[in-house]
Amino acid sequence: MLGVAIRSAITATMTSPRPTTYWDYIHVEDLLSLQGGLPGETAPPSNDEVLFITVHQIYELWFQLILRELQSARDLFGKDTVQEQELSGAVSSLRRISTIFSVASDHFKVVETLPTREYLEFRKKLMPASGGQSAQMRQIEVLFGLDERDRVLLGEKDWHMNILREPDGSEGKAYKRVTEQMAAGPSLRETIEQWLLRTPIDGVAHDDPDAEAALERFITRYLVAHRSEVEENMEYAKSIMAGGVAHEDLESRYQWEAQSAEEFLRPDEAAGGARLARIRAAMIFIETYRELPLLAWPREVLNELIKLEQRFLIYRQRHARMVERVIGSRTGTGGSEGVKYLDETALRYRIFRDLWAVRTLMIRPGATPELERPEFYGFRGDS
Ligand code: HEM
């Protein structure tokens, strides 16, 4: 009996898997062996240099997670039909990404403990390596939906791609990562636009024969309400501003608000025509009637998108301020104008431009135009 028990205990030990350890699961030893600096160097890197390498590695890991979440959200909105209950998953992904950007921006504080002169001690050997060679950052931009026409140009047209080539000019892993990302389907911005295009306006589905007319009715009603709000605000501003800004200046600013709302909701064919008008109207519609059950989650999506983009921009600006503090305005190791280039990217790299523009068009709840068929936005239906 005892022999049988011992034999089965031995067999169990031999066949049961090795209990998981923290170090195996996290690959701690592998991770800790990656901060040794360039291969072939005899002197070990200084603490400053190890900090520099480590922080970059941490960022690359964050970028990897961001890419995963962006992809999940993109795949969801890329479906022909997005169920209401799936939107909470998308919101969680977007929220995770903004949290990561926010935390990652904070890591620049750690880089700022690197004094300028100590950085200069090892900076030359990095050249011409540069953060501009972070393929994952380029993938994030592509997957997010940065319009290639918005890229800040640096001399040669495809600087941002050519800098990813191997030193002999060949297309290595970094270059391929980005080209494969470009070929791997639509961006999050494109899929969000497709989803918005399908938003029923005033309870009329996008493929209903009355869709165009319903859209036009909504746009007209909204623009009338908006213009009356702008005029009321203008009169109020004129009545309380005794001095300072001239009344003509005030008038032209408020008139611009009303005029730009018209142009925004009625773009001409060259700017995007009816398709763009529907996408923009959907954004305004969702924001305006967000308390209706069926619009609550779509509005969360829009809110998370703008929050995410804001944090991405803050990340770029934070990087630029850190760079200015550490190296001033000198030329970047990658050959750019350094902080000037980085500030330009923070200014120009907007993805959801229309979502930002919608902010200028929103009107207070008390002045919101009446909704046709509010009962449509009850607790049923697909988006
Ligand atoms: C002392 C620290 C750092 C300095 C002085 C610095 C400086 C620069 C400069 C000057 C550029 C412009 C391209 C060039 O000419 O090289 C750049 C780009 C970049 N850096 Fe940094 N950087 C630092 C740390 C970091 C860290 C910790 C990250 C985190 C990943 C990072 C990520 C990037 C990225 C992604 C770009 C490309 C930006 C773009 O092209 O849009 N940098 N950096």
Image (cartoon, rainbow, N blue to C red):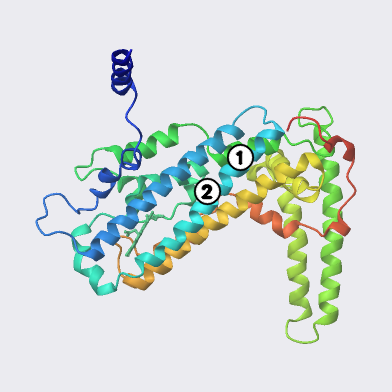
Q: Is residue 312 above or below residue 295?
A: below
Q: Is label 2's Cβ within 8 Å of ligand 1? A: no
Q: Quadrant of ligand 1?
A: bottom left
On the image, the x and y values in percent for residue 149 come to 48, 48
User: At 78% across and 46% down in the image, what residue appears?
Assistant: 285
* Image-based side of 210 in relation to 357, left or right: right
Using a 10 Å C-alpha cutoff, classify the residue at mark 1 as few (fewer than 14 neighbours), some (14 to 19) or many (20 or more). Answer: many
Quarter of the image for residue 139 reads top left
Q: Farthest bottom residue? A: 243
Give the side of residue 315 with respect to residue 45, left or right: right
Image mark for residue 153: none
Q: How many residues crowd around disc 2 within 10 Å: few (fewer than 14), some, or many (20 or more)?
A: many
Q: Earlier in the sequence, mark 2 or mark 1?
A: 1
Tell me what residue is drawn at x 75 percent, y 45 percent: 286
Quadrant housing the C terminus:
top right
Per the rendering, the mark at residue 97 is 2
The foreground one among 17 and 114 is 17
Give the amino acid at mark 1.
Answer: Ala
> Where does the image place residue 356, in percent across and percent down from the top left?
64, 55
Q: Is residue 314 left or right of residue 352?
A: left
Residue 175's x, y, as percent?
A: 32, 40
Q: Which residue is drawn at the image coordinates 75% and 57% (left, top)?
A: 361
Q: Amino acid at mark 2?
A: Ile
Q: Is residue 368 visible?
A: yes
Of residues 127 and 89, the one nearer the viewer is 89
Q: Contact, CB < 8 Å: mark 2 with mark 1? A: no
The residue singled out by tag 1 in the image is: 90
Q: Quadrant of the N terminus?
A: top left
Q: Secondary structure at mark 2?
A: helix
Q: Regarding mark 1 in the picture, which secondary structure is present there?
A: helix
